Image (tube, rainbow, N blue to C red):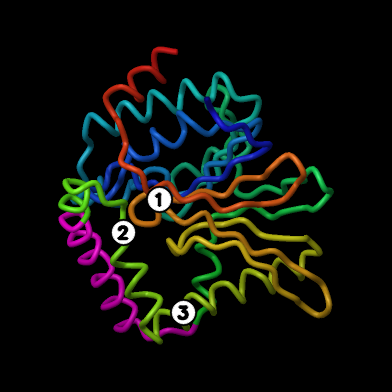
């Protein structure tokens, strides 16, 4: 039986990259539905494909079919492109079938709170960081993703749940923690300046839902995480509250994806 939510946000799937986990996302979408689905950027990794670093597998194609089928059965699907699928931003204000493409969006929850939905790459540009340090950190992250695939392959063989090496390291390295904190503070400050109650974004692959205070105004910061590492999504329950979901179970891709596309 599927869980039904008022709204659901996913980001940073990076379809087309070698690190994407379309099987796990397909498993998640087969069992979690919503009245409104937001695709919050970097759904496709056009950068990796253009640079020859990508890999488009059968799982990616099946997930694409599933998303198309999902859009036909979901009242509203809103796609907000990110920096890795930036060419899609030229479609802002238009529709691709039942999918509405926008640069950003304001979502009104059941409790009346208004959330700014944006990918979030613009916040990173405001962080003061040494370009060399940024490059080293970026390359280290992708190396950890490669190692993580092997680690979780063997964990899966012994029925162990998904484990994130990158999140484990990021939570313990001071420079990484400082970068994440700066990103969150900038997002929260800009949301408060706009007079909104919260922000829902992606980009930094660090899933979170937390409350903050900006000049006496409470602001909710929510980050969807990703589907290369965190395996997470944000949902709005029917009372208007937000919840962060992690999907660390092993997917049954052949059965679930085939049934979902054929349904």
What secondary structure characterizes most of the magenta part?
Answer: helix
In the rendered image, the vertical position of residue 80 relative to residue 32, given as above or below: below
Of tags 1 and 3, the one toward the viewer is 1
Which image quadrant is residue 198 in? bottom right
Residue range (magenta): 128-151
Whole-number angstrom distance, CA of label 3 to CA of label 2: 22 Å
217 on left or right of 227: right
Earlier sequence position, callout 1 versus callout 2: 2
Of tags 3 and 2, the one toward the viewer is 2
162 on left or right of 68: left
- The disc label shown at residue 163, or none: 2
On-image quarter of the C terminus: top left
94 on left or right of 159: right
> Mark 3: few, some, or many residues within 10 Å (few <14, many ≥20)?
some
132 falls in the magenta region: yes
According to the picture, the residue beneath numbered tag 3 turns out to be: 179
- The disc label shown at residue 231, or none: 1
> Mark 1: few, some, or many residues within 10 Å (few <14, many ≥20)?
many
In the rendered image, the vertical position of residue 235 relative to residue 198, given as above or below: above
Callout 3: SS: helix
């Amino acid at each position: 039986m599927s869980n039904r939510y008022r709204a659901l946000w996913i980001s940073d799937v990076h379809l087309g990259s070698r690190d994407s986990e379309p099987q796990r996302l397909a498993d998640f979408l087969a069992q979690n539905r919503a009245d409104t689905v937001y695709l919050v950027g970097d759904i496709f990794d056009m950068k990796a494909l253009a640079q020859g670093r990508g890999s488009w597998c059968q799982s990616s194609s099946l997930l694409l079919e599933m998303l198309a089928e999902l859009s036909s059965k979901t009242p509203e699907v809103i796609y907000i492109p990110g920096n890795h699928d930036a060419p899609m931003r030229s479609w802002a204000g238009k529709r691709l079938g039942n999918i509405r493409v926008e640069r950003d969006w304001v979502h009104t929850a059941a409790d009346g709170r208004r959330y700014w939905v944006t990918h979030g790459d613009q916040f990173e540009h405001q962080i003061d960081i040494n370009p060399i340090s940024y490059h080293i950190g970026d390359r280290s992250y992708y190396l950890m993703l490669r190692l993580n695939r092997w680690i979780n392959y063997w964990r899966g063989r012994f029925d162990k749940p998904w484990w994130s090496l990158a999140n484990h390291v990021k939570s313990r390295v001071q420079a990484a923690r400082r970068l994440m904190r700066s990103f969150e503070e900038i997002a929260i400050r800009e949301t408060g300046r706009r007079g909104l109650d919260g922000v829902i974004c992606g980009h930094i692959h660090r899933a979170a839902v937390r409350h903050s205070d900006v000049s006496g105004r409470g602001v909710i910061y929510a980050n969807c995480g990703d589907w290369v590492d965190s395996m997470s999504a944000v949902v709005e329950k029917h009372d208007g509250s937000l919840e962060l979901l992690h999907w660390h179970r092993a997917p049954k891709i052949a059965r679930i994806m085939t049934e979902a596309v054929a349904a």
